[in-house]
Amino acid sequence: MKDVGDAIFVLGIEIQRDQAQGLLGLSQKTYIERILKRFDMSMCYGQKVPLAKGDLKKEHCPKNKEEDEMRNKPYASLVGSIIYAQVYRRPDLALCISKMERFQSNPGMQHWIAGKKVLRYLQRTKAYVLIYRRTENLELVGYADANLGKAEH
C-alpha cells in the first residue's frame, strides 16, 4: 500500500478542500457533464426546476404495443444515471427520482420528456458544490411539519 496524498476525485465526485477555513466541498460537475453528453443534452439550456406538477402521470404510459414509442429510448438508464447523482450528492433530486422510478416498467414519451427536463435542471446546476464546514460545536438540527401543513387558527 502506498500513500499518494489526499483524494481529489472519487467515484465521479470531485473533492475540494480549504483547510484554512475548514471547508470540504463535493462536486459532481464532471459526472453530470458526462451524463448530459451521453443523452445528447450537453448543449441544452438550463432550467430552474427539475419537474413541474403533472409532468409524470400514469395516463402517459402506453396502453398497447402500437403506442409504445419508447422501445428505443434508454429511460431506465437515464433514471439510473440521475439516481447515482442524487444518492451521493444531490438530495434536491430525490422527489423527481421517486416519481420517475414509478414508470420504469412502462414509460411513455411524456416520461422521457420529463427525464430530459431533469437533465436541463442538471445542466443549470452542475456547478453546485455541497460544502461541509468544520465546527467545534456539532449539533444535529431537524425540522418537522407537526401540523401536517394545516393552517393554525
Image (cartoon, rainbow, N blue to C red):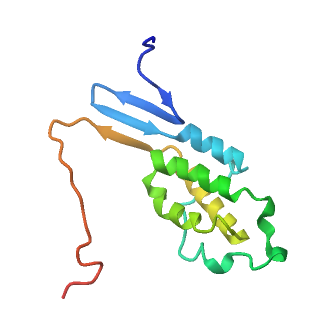
The image quadrant that residue 73 belongs to is: bottom right
Asked if residue 22 is positioned above or below residue 126 in the image, the reply reads: above
Q: Where residue 23 sits: x, y (%)?
A: 31, 33
Q: Is residue 148 left or right of residue 108?
A: left
Residue drawn at the location 52% of the way across and 47% of the way down:
85
Q: Position of residue 81 (x, y in %)?
A: 60, 49
Question: Viewer-proximal residue, 77 or 122?
Answer: 77
Identify whether 67 is placed above or below 33: below
Query: Which residue is at the far top?
Result: 2
Q: Is residue 119 toward the left or the right of residue 14 in the image?
A: right
Image position, residue 127 (x, y; %): 50, 43
Residue 121 quadrant: bottom right
Horizontal side of residue 43 vs 2, given as left or right = right
Q: Can residue 56 be seen at all in this image of the molecule?
A: yes
- Residue at 65% x, 60% y: name it: 116
Residue found 63% across the figure and 61% down from its top? 115
Q: How many marks?
A: 0
* Quarter of the figure with residue 16: top left
Q: Is residue 49 visible?
A: no
Q: Nearer the viewer, residue 71 or 41?
A: 71
Q: Residue furthest right?
A: 66
User: x, y percentage for residue 119?
Assistant: 61, 55
For the C terminus, give its image quadrant. Answer: bottom left
